[in-house]
Amino acid sequence: MSVDLRLEYQGGGKFQTITKRDFETAEGEYAVGERVVSKTHRQRSVSQNNLFHALIEAAFDNQRAGPTFANWRQLKGWLLVEAEHSETDEVSLIDPDRKRPLSLRHASFIVSGFATSIRRRLGVEYVRITYRPNRAVALLTYPKSWKFHDTDGDTAGDVMNRVVEIITQVIMPGSTVEEIMDEARSRAGMMKQPRKEAA
């Protein structure tokens, strides 16, 4: 059994639940004295979150190539899917009565409805639609949540590295990682730390 709890380190090897919900979950799942094994990770910081969004906005404003989007939020969704920070739902396009694929028009209607449902339910602005070779199954891929409690600092750092790589290769080819990150830091109000000279 796996239970997610947000904890704050209190010192002396002790942790305390952060929210009332975390406390109630712990109280409901465990008995006093019960031993548990935990896996820890660091929550990402507000500055890391701001830098990520500044990076996406900078890529949107300076885009030179690649697919175009109406706003930076759609680009964010596409980048997260490209970086494989995503989930995929499968939709069967087989007519249950006839045991054969639906007509293209009927299938398009169903897939469009599922995509709209995902956008509304999850608040995402980008859903990639692909099909299996026989067109009997549609694959709807959408970005995973980027909320603080869903994406820890380590995961966010890995995803951000992949996003920067995609930006340099697809969205802003010819740009360096340094140029892109400098622009993002400037937008996020973060000053780049000067390098220390070797003594």
Image (cartoon, grey):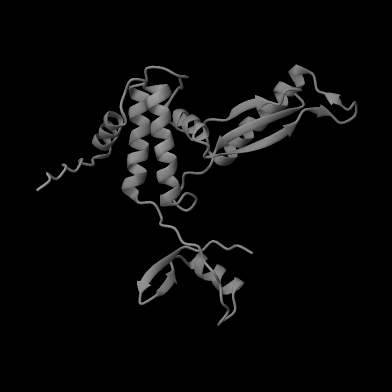
Residue 100 located left or right of residue 189: right
Residue 182 located left or right of residue 73: left
Residue 176 located left or right of residue 110: left
Residue 72 seen from this side: no
Image quadrant containing the N terminus: bottom right
- Considering every residue shown, the one lying at the far right of the view is 98
Q: Residue at x 31, y 23 (%)?
A: 175
Quarter of the image where one finds residue 177: top left
Residue 179 located left or right of residue 1: left
- Considering every residue shown, the one lying at the far front of the view is 199
Number of numbered labels in the structure image: 0
Q: Residue at x 63, y 31 (%)?
A: 115
Q: Position of residue 72 (x, y in %)?
A: 41, 28
Quarter of the image where one finds residue 41: bottom left
Q: Position of residue 92 (x, y in %)?
A: 76, 32
- Considering every residue shown, the one lying at the far left of the view is 199
Q: Residue at x 35, y 51 (%)?
A: 45
Quarter of the image where one finds residue 10: bottom left
Identify whether 127 is placed above or below 14. Answer: above
Q: Position of residue 65 (x, y in %)?
A: 41, 17
Which of these two is toward me, 85 or 140? Answer: 85
Which of these two is toward me, 160 or 19? Answer: 160
Residue 31 seen from this side: yes
Q: Position of residue 14 (x, y in %)?
A: 41, 75
Identify whether 117 is placed above or below 134. Answer: below
- Considering every residue shown, the one lying at the far bottom of the view is 33
